[in-house]
Amino acid sequence: MKKLIIVALLAIGITGFAQEGKKKKGHEVSTEMRLKKMTEELSLNADQQKQLIPVLEEQTSIKKAIKENPETKEENKVKMKENGKKFKGILTPEQFEKWKGTTGKGKGHGEGKKKNAADESEE
């Protein structure tokens, strides 16, 4: 019984270290995961996937720059919008609309609540 408990504890410990190793890859995994998710949601073809890799990597670097240097946030937001326009050239119109719908859910929803609350207080 003691041997079984020791083996189980070792297995749990090794699994914990293995998961930490995956996290260290950082944005490389993030870009791959985002591409995989977009491929599944938007049914991207191989050519579109190849074209999106540099766009997603650029987007990741812009987000990292915003996080590291908040003073350049507005400048980097402009870069982010320009980068977002590249999606329109790569995706079909249907894919682009679906992508816009998935990326704008959280942001637009919160802004709408603020506007509604402001409208109600004015009345």
Image (cartoon, rainbow, N blue to C red):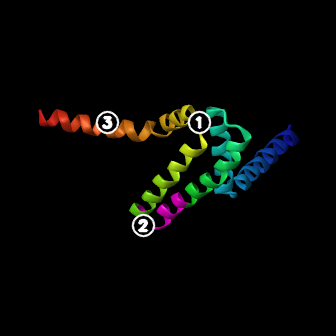
Disc 3: CA contacts within 10 A as few (<14), some (14-19) or many (>=20):
few
Quarter of the view holding residue 27: bottom right
Of labels 3 and 2, earlier in sequence is: 2
Label 1 secondary element: loop
Instruction: State whether the magenta stretch is mostly helix, strand or loop.
Output: helix
Q: Quadrant of the N terminus?
A: top right
Label 3, label 2: how many angstroms apart (C-alpha)? Answer: 27 Å
- Mark 1 or mark 2, which has the lower sequence index? 2
Please tell me which residue is depicted at 47% across the width and 59% down the height of the picture: 79
The residue under label 1 is 92
Q: Nearer the viewer, mark 1 or mark 3?
A: 1
Sooner in the amino-acid sequence: mark 1 or mark 3: 1
In percent of the image, x 68 and y 55: which residue is there? Answer: 28
Up-down relation of residue 42 to residue 74 (above or below): above
Q: Secondary structure at mark 3?
A: helix
92 sits left or right of 13 in the view: left
Res. 112 mark: 3
Out of 109 and 57, give the one closest to the viewer. 57
Q: CA distance from mark 1 to mark 3?
A: 28 Å
Q: Amino acid at mark 2?
A: Thr
Residue drawn at x 54%, y 37% is 96
In this picture, residue 64 sits left or right of residue 73 = right
Q: Which stretch did the figure color magenta?
A: 62-73
Instruction: Say above or below: 10 vs 62.
Output: above
| Residue picked out by circle 2 | 72
Q: Is residue 65 magenta?
A: yes
